[in-house]
Amino acid sequence: MSVPGFPRRILLAVTGLTPQIVTETLYALAVAQAEPWIPTEIRLITTTEGAERARLSLLDPKEGQFHALCRDYGLEGKIAFPAQNIVVIRDAGGAPLADIRTPEDNTLAADALLAEVRSLCADEKCALHVSIAGGRKTMGFFLGYALSLFGRAQDRLSHVLVNEPFEALREFYFPPAQARVLHTAKGRPIHTADAQVLLADIPFVRLREGLPRQALAHGAPFASLVSTAQLAVDPPTLRFELKQARVWCGTQAVALPPSLLAWYAWLAECRAAGLGEEGFMRHSDASPDRYLAIYAKVVGRNHPSLEKARLATRGGLDASQFEQKRSKINRQLEAALSLASAPYKVCNRGRRPLTRYGIALPPERIETALIK
């Protein structure tokens, strides 16, 4: 069945020593369901041993079980599965991995799986069905996690379920159209008409919208993206390191230009101390003295920009300064944190000319010790 609006439909799977999961999953999707989902393309991610097994057992022109399934169920010519769609994980030097046995191998696998999912999810006309039934357990976990980071509404995650004794039978790849007798390892005859191949749909949390825009386009490693995604669920906190010209939003360091960092730290201090109206400041009520004192801590008391800031605020603060700083700070936060920036933004309350500016974080979540 075609998916309206998604002309490209990809079955993506990890495999190891059991390439059967590919044909089993394809059978469950395209044949066994009441509403078939027929992929237009199949892609595998595996090791050198897994790639060789997949090529020989699935794609051999005469004996390949992928071709056999397509012949049995009228799918010939409908699903692209060339040998180059079998992606082999490679080490730091570009050599293919024979297996995943070390922590370093696990890191390489995680980054390779993340890169594949990121690339496929960048295509808005593509719907992705991800199977985590094959390969090592860590591979399935990484693939599912990658989909959680980048998956869209149209993407799905599953594990294929096969009843005993067919699950452990190396000869079994899918229930053939013409049922036949197979034999277990102990020689017991079994009939393929008794095979049950089902998909367990796995719900997952879609974190895509909470990731920085740069992460959707560039190759940030798996561990880095997980840390970024954590920002979306951790309680928000603010901590300033003025001499390092940065502010910590939760566990994420954000660099700000000196004037913006000083202004942001000043507003944070006002909020933590409850100055103004619950920590929100109106331009006519605010003195520039404390802002300038913080600015001096950032750039040093003899820095030329400090004198420029003094001149700009000599007549006091005006509404345009508050609005300009708010806009610039928020753009920097959005660029660094994406949707996770929301609790850290400078916001305003009230209508002009009574508009007040501040940070809405609870005061107890703002650490001001390093501002003093």
Image (tube, rainbow, N blue to C red):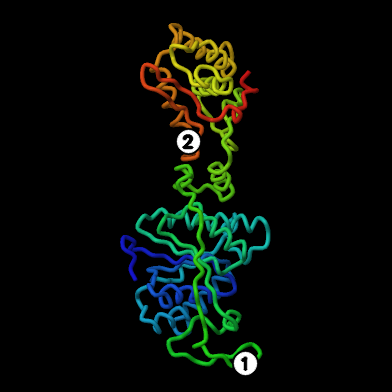
Above or below, 335 against 150 in this view is above
Residue 284 image-quadrant placement: top left
Q: Is residue 321 left or right of residue 297?
A: left
Task: Identify the residue shown where x is 47% and y is 36%.
Answer: 342
| Mark 1 or 2: the one toward you | 2
- Secondary structure beneath disc 2? helix
Q: Which kind of residue does numbered mark 1 sit on?
A: Arg
Residue 197, image x and y in percent?
A: 50, 78
Name the residue tied to disc 1: 188
Above or below, 17 against 164 in this view is above
Q: Which residue is outermost to the top?
A: 315
Q: Crowdedness of circle 2 by 10 Å Cα count: few (<14), some, many (20+)?
A: some
Q: Crowdedness of circle 1 by 10 Å Cα count: few (<14), some, many (20+)?
A: few
Name the residue tied to disc 2: 342
Above or below, 66 against 159 in this view is below
Residue 71, image x and y in percent?
A: 39, 83
Residue 15 image-quadrant placement: bottom right
